[in-house]
Amino acid sequence: MIIHLSKGVGAEEASKLAEKAKAFHIHKGEQQILITSSSVKEVPDFLKGKTDESWVFDNDMQLASKAYIKGTREVTIGNVTIGGDTKNTLLIGGPCSVESESQIRSAAEILKNMGLTTLRGGCYKPRTSPYSFQGLGSEGLQLLVKMREEYGLSVITEVRDATHVDEVIEFSDVVQIGAKAMYDQGILRACAKIKKPVLLKRGFGTTLQEFVQAAEFILSGGNENVILCERGIRTFETKTRFTLDLCGVAYLQEYTNLPVILDPSHALGYAYGVTSLAKACTAMGVDGLIIETHENPKVAKSDASQQLTYDEFAQLYAETSKVAAAVGYKIV
Ligand code: PEP
Ligand code: MN
């Protein structure tokens, strides 16, 4: 249950009431908010004279629910806002991994020249094999910081585990929680304490309910800037790397108030269909796309098969822009 306390109740009193109600306590401006488990169906007696408005839910999709906030929440990344009434589809581009200064610089230059704003690049890579390239770690992060300073881009990079979550939070503009890391409580709780946007990717065996519950960990800690990312789930199909769950996207758009970004690169796993998929996603009026692109995909140290060349990426931008316009959106 979500309870908005009466206007006169201050933060200190709200915190004591939260303790008594075994509830989370967050505030939005002056508004003090308590969140209990969804099994609570009535405002407790001791809160009766102190409650403005309350919402009852049938499961623990609460703060993320459209039943609580009708539209889509706005999230601002650098000087671009998505969600709300913006009708912006943020096109994030860059390599799977930061590999060297010249490689990440080439991606930054491409984005800058195209008028795009947000550069991706993994530094702590959650690889399936210990023998594969694991990412440049801190060195990669500092290269992203350099690109932000030189090109004025926002940077997004992923957290692999809780040991370096504080470092990623400090240096990245958007914290990406990867598909394999999305259940990590250390990461979720650390991201709950900050205000920076968090891109939460859906695990490939994660139900929509579990996905949204992971987002609730971040929201209930007071970070409102959560973006969901559908990146493909595992099905019986083996010809493609994963299956992009557009039905799931429709569900998230209908029932949650969080912006949704689509990752066709990881879903398909091959460059050939990424642009088509990106167009299909754009047609759904999504809040963003995250696309892997590399100066020379053939020699990429991770996810070589799915990264677009810069020419292909430019083509994707041109084609998705037309689709976006047709549905009243704009690729930014
Ligand atoms: C990535 O973005 O490079 C990545 C590893 O994604 P995911 O966590 O979705 O597999
Ligand atoms: Mn990748």
Image (tube, rainbow, N blue to C red):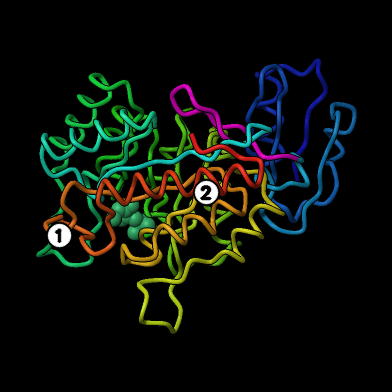
Q: In this view, does 299 lie above or below 165?
A: below
Residue at the location (39% across, 65% down)? Answer: 273
Read off the residue under disc 2: 228
Quadrant in which ligand 2 is drawn: bottom left
Q: In this view, does 26 lie above or below 303?
A: above
Point out residue 312 in the picture as x, y percentages from the top left corner.
Answer: 31, 51
User: Who is closer to the viewer here, 38 or 166?
Assistant: 166
Point out residue 211 in the picture as x, y percentages from the top left corner.
Answer: 54, 58
Queried whether the magenta region covers residue 81, the answer comes back as yes
Q: Is 156 on the left or on the right of 89, as rendered? A: left
Mark sitting on residue 127:
none
Q: Is 190 on the left or on the right of 306, as rendered? A: right
Point out residue 192 in the picture as x, y percentages from the top left corner.
Answer: 48, 37
Q: Residues within 10 Å of mark 2 (few under 14, many from 20)?
A: many
Is ligand 1 closer than 8 angstroms to the Cβ of mark 2? no
Q: Label 2 amino acid? A: Leu
Q: Residue 269 lies in what quarter of the image?
A: bottom left
Q: Residue 6 lies in what quarter of the image?
A: top right
Q: Label 1 amino acid? A: Lys
The part of the chain drawn in magenta is 71-82
Separation of disc 1 and disc 2 at Cα?
30 Å
Mark sitting on residue 298:
1
